[in-house]
Image: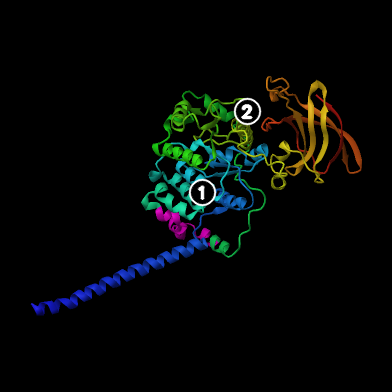
Amino acid sequence: MSKRKNISQPKTVQQVKKHRELVFRFFLFSAIVAGVVYYTDAKGYFNPDYTNDHTRRKWNAYYEFTKHQPVDVVLVGNSHLYTGVSPEHLSNALGASCFILASPGTTMTDTYYALKEAITVRKPRMAIVETFTLNDYDSHELKPGTLSEQFKSFSARKNFVQKVLSTPVLFASDHYAAAWSNTIRNHSFIFTDTAQIRRNIALSKVKQPNQQGLYLGRYIRFTSGIEDSTLLKYDRPGFKAYEYSKHMPSPEALKFLEKTIRLCEENDIELVLLTLPMYHRHVHDYEQYKQVIQKTAGVQVSWLDLQLPYDTAAFTPESFENTVAENQHMTYQGSLVAAYKLAAYINEKHPGAVPDRSGEMAWKQLFYGSDGYFENHSPEKDGVSKVLMTDAEVSGGIKVKELILVPQQGAKRLLMKLENRKTSNTDAGVISISALKPMTVDVEMLAGNERTVVPVQLLPAVSVNPSNHVLMVSDYLDPRIEVEKVVNIRL
């Protein structure tokens, strides 16, 4: 017996040594792989092309923005939001700081975690949650395109702890590594896109410049509306571009809507749900979809629904992308209409919730001259803008609050603000934009050494609807001209 024991001992020791050696090699190999992945991720060698990655740009800008000033309104959602609302015009209309943190193709689940991180960085007074994220999805069974967009959104966020906690919620277990590592996610670049790797290597050697100028998350994608030939497609018998009944909110979507509502309540943040429209002939079965959201959210949740009821006078075909594909976005013009409707809703339904900072020097320095500033506020003595008239009454009892000449789009433009009088008991004195007719302003201009009186036509600004006045605008004028004075105003 003792001999057998002595004979078997060397074999056992040898097996243990071999096992330990295999384990050591495994961990050494894993450590080397992990080190390589960490290094290439840190250097960004397998990054996708970030040229048009506005999700990453938004988060970078948000973190930088909130280092220096408060953010009053945070807007979260998907591409319908960042193409459908102008944050500059919304900020200028409210006299506040409004920031869009939206990502293409994102879900309500991802939107919840985006809002949670935004609150952690700096708590806003109000959260606007866009509702097109409420559709039929399961985060663990996303289609490749939607999964790719969720990877991008997750990658762009910065809060490590929240990302760790959200990983098992947002992704199936076989996607964890890809969610955290561009090297793992894009290792196929070695075979399919070596040019991108070379670009990334070159970029890693150059310090990237900081974002310049005011950026609030806007992304202008479409600048022209639905063409007549496209409108004819809606006349085809039985044609339905987008059927909401086929995209009803999943249990997961409704669960994270409830979590979003509680998140805002716990942080004392006013919540507004926002539904941005598609063209009214584009959508079908919307009432059914709306009822499901209303049942989950409850009547106590504020909801600005621009799809139903639909404002046909405001949201014309020019407000929408020229397509009959399911996912129709808004144009720049549509984003202005929506921004002013949202501003009016906030002022009416949530008075005092968002501070008016327009009298604060810090706010003025940040927003002065930005898109929508002069439409809502008076210019300073900046050496370029000029106040031509204030508090003047013209024929028809119309009172001109202000007529200004300001720089816009590399040119100059006349903006006329008409008093929009309204009492608590009557709408008398309220100017209807649809009833306004063009005005002609005769101005004395100086071009070189010559003075001449030139008629300039002003039209109602149908897309820009400030709460305190009605706006009339001229076409863009040659930036070299100087307007000396107003000679006459004719209706």
Place of residue 436 in the rendered image (x, y in percent of width and height, measured from the top left): 73, 24
Residue 139 rendering spot, x and y as whole percentages: 41, 44
| Kind of residue sitting beneath label 1 | Glu
Let me know if residue 92 appears in the view: yes
Secondary structure, mark 2, is loop
Give yes or no for residue 278 being in the magenta stretch.
no
Q: Element type at marker 1? A: helix
Magenta residues span 176-198
Q: In x, y percent, where is residue 34?
A: 41, 64
Q: Quadrant of the N terminus?
A: bottom left
Asked if 351 appears above or below 39 in the picture, the reply is above
In front of the other: 112 or 195: 112
Q: Callout 2: few (<14), some (14-19), or many (20+) C-alpha neighbours within 10 Å? A: some
The residue wearing badge 2 is 314
Residue 63 position within the rendered picture, expressed as x and y whole percent measured from the top left: 58, 52
Q: Name the front one of labels 1 and 2.
A: 1
Q: Amino acid at mark 2?
A: Ala
Residue behind mark 1: 117
